Amino acid sequence: MNKASVPASAGEAVRGGAQMAAGTQEQAQHAQELLDPTPGKSGGRWKPYVGALVSVALVCLAIWVLHRFTQDVTVGEIRDSLDDTPPGRILIALIATAVSFAALAGFDIVATRTSAPGRVSWWVAAAAGSAGFAVSNALGFGVLTAGSLRYRIYSSEGLDAADVVRVMATSWMTFWLGFVSIFGLTLTFAPGTLTDIQWMTGGADRAVGIVVLAALVAFVVWLGRTPRTVRLGGWSLRLPDAKMAIAQILLGSIDLAASAIVLYALLPSGSVGSVPYFLLVYVGAVILGLISHAPGGVGAFEATLVAGLGVGGRADVIAALIVYRIIYYVLPLGVTAVGLVLSEGLRRKERIQSAAGTAQAILRPIVPIAAAALVFLAGVVLLISGVLPAVQGRLGVLRHFVPLAAAETSHLLASVIGVCLLIVGRGLVRRLQFAWVAALVLLAASAFLSLAKGLDWEEAAIMAAIAVALISFRSAFYRRGFSADMHLSLPWLVMVIATVAAATWLGFFTYRHVEYSSDLWWNFAWHTHEHGNASRFLRATVAVGILILWIGIDTLVNRRFALPFEPDPIDDRIRNVVAASPNTNSYLALLGDKKMLMTADESAFLMYGRSGKSWVSMGDPVGPDDTAVDLIWRFRELADRNAGRVVFYSVGPGHIPTYLDMGLGLLKIGEVARVNLTTFSLAGGKRADFRYANKRAEREGITFEVMPKADVPAHMTEFRGVSDAWLESKSGSEKGFSLGFFSESYVSETDAVVLRQNGEIIAFANLWRGAEKEELSIDMMRYLPGRSSVLMDALFAQLLLWGKAEGYRWFNLGAAPLAGLSNHPLASTWNRVGTLLYRRGEDFYRFEGLKAFKQKFDPVWTPQYIACPGGLVIPQVLMDVTALVSRGRFGMLRK
């Protein structure tokens, strides 16, 4: 089993799902923060750093243990042992590897049957499980690699982020059930296995084993009595029934036993005294490797095995571990990569069988992660090559064609490029176009440098082959972005540090018999004795160390550079589309704070902004209905190409099927009030307040008028005075994006509604007119404080009567935020939280007061939604949208 891909805890599995819902890791950092303690508590902020330090410390301890147990082993002895590996043992290891990966495929089959019954076919689950484990073997951090891979595959099957989290958690449960069963069976039927532990006797470990098995049986019986669900906050996990739990136990046991057989078959005779003891040591090594977060648990796994079996100082054991890594880790990765290449070839054929098309659909999402694994592997190859001695005789040939300075420089640069490839893999996971280009450049350079530093044609061939694979999958890397998206997360940084640390230890292991002195730093020569090779290793180690230090500092201080966002200027193309739209919300395009995605014939557009990683559309597309769906998908593609998350804010019910087809979730954010002007009047008891406001306004000398657009600039100074006085009386600041703000250019775009008192303008609002007199509305209403208590009622009463006289059918009163949300106990968490805010949040916003004012007009209420990725990324989306409306992150702190 891919031991580095199993979450160490249920919380980590949940965090993995959060990272997937964020898409990348993207995004992953914010999702991770949601599961940490409250921001006000110091523990939440430092938790990721503590985990990273623990992982690095464990890697360092593993390296120290390996160093102690391999002091008497030479590289030549290891090479001899590799050559002497019996073919029969290799065949057994290959068969056991196939059995283990078949069990791993079963992990996801059981998980989908339990967490998403009937929604994923067994062969899709099997492909996702086996391919995901194979890829995460190379990269480690299965929550990030295998987790994001599963999300890509299962989301195409209709599963959302929460469903994928449940599949991961159930798969994690399979591993631990297998571990518990093997632990209990070993202690029960092989008592005395742990007699080396002084406080554990043969009888005691049998008693422990019986208790463990009894607890396992009780757990299965408990699951069989009634359906069980585990809840963690607002997240729930349906536990398997008894039948599925038994299947999990069998699959987990088969996987661990088969993967243990792979290594057991390769170990030399006499190195393992007791099979049960070896099995327990192996499982313990797997768990420690998992906790270390190094790729494949490298270092911690080997150190635990060598120390636990007491086989330190044996070259044949080290050789067996190397072959084990190749068979169980590298070979499945190669098979996965070959499968990707074949599926890509099938995709390009004009005639394709349905089964082949299905295989392509399954394997296609794996491309970015598989490419990252291959590039990461290329970096590992370069780092290992940089610390191992050059092949005898090649330098003698090379010296006739390449100057010594060029060879020494090539050796140094190849090691530095190795680290760069480890980092670029991060961008490939995120499908970044820049990462793809950088990987190709680095691979091409490393192939040349491999030849220039020692005629290492094998390395050059590997680099060229990986470059060819990347070129064949060019279309998979289409996202734009650079600095913010290439920034390393803490888990990826730990993985890079662990890899470099392991390669550095290998160098010191190789040259441990060399006497280190200051002369080694300046030893430049063609000879291949240990001193010459050690000099190159030391210089490369210093260069790599400096690079890692810089990268680590950059990661810890979290330097992120967002790409600039420049709104599009307002031109006649936009004005013409707005004028032709019956929907008055289209006038928000004239604010000048958005970019426009227009159709080719310039008859429609979609307006949007960007905040954080969110690309936010303001409402549905503006223009003819037959263009809307195409614009929505184009915007989705635009956000995806730029590694952003797509958000459709303040949309109506009309295009809900399209948003659902994208796999987005829908949150109701309120209701829009529209008054039917054809039946509106001030007659009746419900309109008494408006009749009173009209009469009092008349007594106070307040008059109503609609000022034509052409006259607005001449009164701009008066408008600004009213607006400034109104803002000064409020505790907040001007908003934007979905609400108008005062600017002379924006106010000059439309007619204005004006209230005068004795000739002085005391209130105004910009007037939005829908095409064909379908709708009328106002956006920005500003008035002088203290002039009259009936200004708002009087203005709306006069305006609605004027609109009716002009022949308009509807008056749009705007939205009532959080109105109309369900408070049913079975409603979604968002609905219940929104309802609580609506009822208890009057200190922050007049939710109920605004709804009550608009209700006086007896409007027709239409639901309003936000369509966005689901799962734990929702709070970040809401923060990004709020920042857009508040015109910046600091604006969020004000009302």
Image (tube, grey):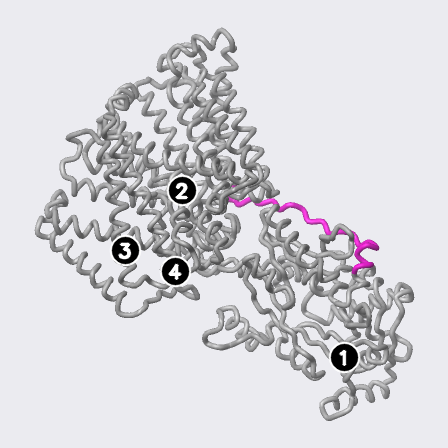
Q: Quick one: label 3 or label 1, which is nearer the N terminus?
A: 3
Image side of residue 360 versus residue 643, left or right: left
What kind of element bears circle 3? helix
The reply to whether residue 91 is in sight is yes
| Magenta span includes 568 | yes
Of the residues shown, which amino acid type is indicated by label 4?
Ser
Image side of residue 656 versus residue 235, left or right: right
Of the residues shown, which amino acid type is indicated by label 3?
Ala
Residue shown at the point (50%, 23%) measured from the top left? 447
- Examine the image and state in which quarter residue 377 appears: top left
In magenta, the rendered stretch is 554-577
Badge number at residue 247: 3
Label 2 environment density (alpha carbons within 10 Å; few <14, some 14–19, many ≥20)? many
- Residue identifier under label 2: 136
Residue shown at the point (19%, 36%) measured from the top left? 309
Gap between marks 4 and 1, in whole Å?
54 Å
Gap between marks 3 and 1, in whole Å?
68 Å
Label 4 environment density (alpha carbons within 10 Å; few <14, some 14–19, many ≥20)? many
Badge number at residue 115: 4
Badge number at residue 792: 1
- Examine the image and state in which quarter residue 141 appears: top left
Q: Nearer the viewer, residue 838 or 13?
A: 13
Of the residues shown, which amino acid type is indicated by label 1?
Met
Of the residues shown, which amino acid type is indicated by label 2?
Ser
Disc 3 and disc 4 in contact, CB within 8 angstroms: no
Q: In this view, does 643 lie above or below 853?
A: above
